[in-house]
Every structure is written in structure tokens, then in C-alpha cells.
Image (cartoon, helix red, strand yellow):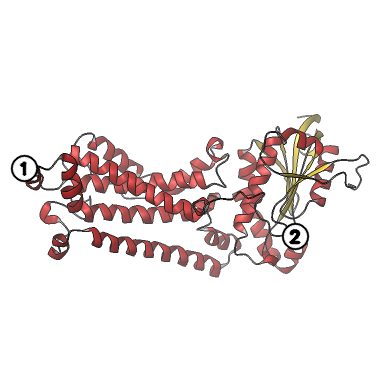
Amino acid sequence: MTDGRKVAAILLADIVGFSRMAGGDEERTLARLRALRSDLIDPTVAIHNGRVVKGTGDGVIADFRSVVEAVRCAIEIQSGMAERNVGVSADKRIVFRIGIHLGDVVEEADGDLMGDGVNVAARLEGICEPGGICLSEDAYRQVRDKLHETFVDLGEPSLKNIPRPVRVYLLRGTAGAGGAVNPPAAPASKSPRGALRWAALAAALVGVGLGALLGHSGKGGFVIVNVANAARAIPSVALLTLLAIQPAILRHSGGGLVPAFIAMFALGVPPVLTNSYVGVRNVDADVRSAAFAMGMTGAQVLWRVELPLAAPLVMAGVRTAAVEVVATATLAAYVGFSDLGSYIFAGLATQNAVETFSGALLVAALALVTDMALAAAGRAITPAGVRQSGRTGRQFGVGADVSTVRPPGVPKAPATT
């Protein structure tokens, strides 16, 4: 490849106060920076069709074919940093300044970029406020009618070694805190914890509803349950990774919440669906016939007879799904979709055993509390006669696990990997 000129959108990001942080704890700071490169910056640049040109020690230079994509990438990086800085003391926060310019650059044979375009982006980064994004007028003209963001006109400040005046526009973050850029007002459900709750609820509603209907009708259950069982064999990390490389899903995904929700929902539905189907389908035929003989409709039989008797098995599936959702949310931190497991992976990256253990302890406690709460709820909704018998519904043909009780033709569910 020979040297050549091209017009490109240049993004230059740099850490505020990096020398001070490195002086205090160089190894930990460098480890955190490497983790940010691999978990946040490089994947976000790739998602927006950009290319990381090179690292600058405490920052990165990237080029894009589109200024819109460059600004979207910068916004996601700053938003991702805001999430990662929650609960971190001010002196240990990693905060970026980002400059973006559209200009002519020289691409060398090794892929490095030189020239006025890179120099202007570097000077824009230098005058930017912490947590913010500065655009040159050339870059701003490309995005002003395409992005619904509030830019502040900073006029034409003096840029070192740039002879001509350059008008600068600032997209503010939370100054000094690495906060989200122009954070919109959002309900609590927009948080990672909100995504976890909604994913668990959606998985329970869909799984119980569909499983109960299929178990009651006896139609289509074999195919649906086998598909659900096959889905349980998909490793959580594999599904999260596949979602992480899908630009159409990640773009405008609210900081990764949509992909996290999809993964948690997809892995939470199968155990609920399977248990609900098996529980309703295995209610004793004589009990079902007696209910119809008493004049009940199909819906009444399902709601007042089959579901109450299947409650122990249904709730066992809900408990399994809830723990699966917690586990998936924890792993989602590895690809930048969640903050639940961030302490674990940050501790591993920095070889901090205390931080890793603390993060693991929090996740384990959350899973245990969730399981115990759902176990109590299961006991509460189980008919008194079934609870008092101590047989959890087996006198009606309802088991506690699909591996021991299942309709003819339905194979045992595979172990979750």
C-alpha cells in the first residue's frame, strides 16, 4: 500500500489527568486502560464502521467515513464511561476528552494517519472539557440536522499551531465526572437493573402463557418444547457475543440495554416454557375430565384447575429462569452490556482479588435472594391441599422437575451450559 490522501472524520480521545493517575498506581491504571480498549472503545469504533488507527498511550485515534458515525461513537464511549464511573471515587475515575474533525489526511503505507486533519482533532481534544466532545465547524455541519443533540458554539478559540481560525462546537457531558453526554430523562427501567427486572418478568409471562396454552391444548407442544430445550444449550457468552457484533441491534440501543434484554429474555424463556407445558400437560386426565363434567369452560379449567395444580413445577421454571437472567446479566458486563458483573471483570483485569471476590459475592447474594423470594412466592400460590400433602402435586401427576416427569414424546431437557 502506498501513501495516499483522503478525507476522513478523525476522532481523537484522551484521558484527563492520566499522568497523575499513572503516577499513583501505574500498573492498575494501564490495566484499566487496556480493559477499556478491549471492552468499550475498540468494539464501539468497529460497530460504527470506524478504524482504530493507533493508541496514543493514554488515548486513541480513529477514523470514520461518516462524521455522524464518529459522533455517535463518541457519545457511546462517553456514556459507557459514565456507567463505569458510577460509584468510583473522583480521583480514580477515567474521564475522556474527545475531539472530532472532518478534514484531509495522508494515509501512510502502514495505515497511520498524518496531516492537518489529525492535528486539528488533537487541538480540539485539548480544549474540550472533561467528559465532553468538541467538533470543528466542518464536522458540525455534517451532523447538526441529523443528530438530536444540543451543541454549544464556543466561537473561534486559539488552537496551538493551527494558523487559521476554527469555529468549535461542544457537546457537553457532566463536567469533570465523565457523565453521559446530554443524558435524557428516562424512567428507572432504562438502567441495567431495570433491564434485568423487565427481562425476567417478560420471560416469565411469555413462558407461562405460551407453555400453559400449549399444555392445555396438547397441540404443537412437541415442537415448541424441543426448540426451547435446544435453546437452553446455547452458552450465555456465545449469545452475548453474537449480539455484540450486530450493528443493527447495537445502534441506538440505549448503552447496550436492548442487547442485554434480548439475551436475558432469550435465555430465560426456555425453562419457564418447558416447565409450564409439562406441568399443565401432566395434570391427571381424570381431574381434567371431572372439571369439564362440572360445566367448566376450557379457560376455566386451565385457570382454576390446571395452573394451580401445576404451580410447583411452573414456579420451579420461573426460579431457574430468574437465576439464568442474573447469570446472563453478570456475563453481559464482559461485552459492555451491563454493570452487574463490572466489578468482577475489573478485578480480573487489574488482578485485584478483593474487588473480584466482592463482585462475585454481590452476584451470588442477588441470585440467592431472588431464588428464595420466588420459592416463597411459589409456596404462597400453591393450593393449600397440595402444600399440606407435602407431595408438591405428584398426586395429580405434577412433578417438580421435567427430567423426572414429562409427557410422552418430550425428551429430557439438556443441561444448561
Residue 5 coordinates in the image, percent (x, y): 81, 29
Which residue ends up furthest to the right in the rendered image?
A: 163
Question: Could you tell me how far apart the alpha carbons at marks 1 and 2 are, in whole angstroms?
Answer: 77 Å
Residue 126 coordinates in the image, percent (x, y): 82, 51
Residue under numbered circle 1: 293
Q: Residue at x 70, y 67 (%)?
A: 91
Residue under numbered circle 2: 18
Which residue ends up furthest to the front in the rendered image?
A: 295
Mark 1 lies on a secondary structure that is: helix
Instruction: Give the crowd class for mark 2: few <14, some 14-19, many >=20 residues within 10 Å.
Output: some
**Residue 414 visible (yes or no):** no
- Horizontal side of 111 relative to 331 (left or right) equals right
Name the foreground residue: 224 vs 299.
Answer: 299
> Residue 171: which disc?
none
Examine the rendered structure and indicate whether residue 211 appears above or below residue 400: above
Examine the rendered structure and indicate whether residue 35 appears above or below residue 45: below
Instruction: Give the crowd class for mark 1: few <14, some 14-19, many >=20 residues within 10 Å.
Output: few
Question: Which amino acid, mark 2?
Answer: Phe
- Horizontal side of 187 relative to 36 (left or right) equals left
Question: Which amino acid, mark 1?
Answer: Ala
**Residue 282 visible (yes or no):** yes
Residue 54 coordinates in the image, percent (x, y): 73, 44
Q: Residue at x 26, y 59 (%)?
A: 378
- Horizontal side of 19 relative to 155 (left or right) equals left
Name the foreground residue: 32 vs 247.
Answer: 247
Residue 125 coordinates in the image, percent (x, y): 79, 49
Mark 2 lies on a secondary structure that is: helix
**Image quarter of the N terminus:** top right
Q: Residue at x 38, y 50 (%)?
A: 201
Q: Residue at x 63, y 46 (%)?
A: 76
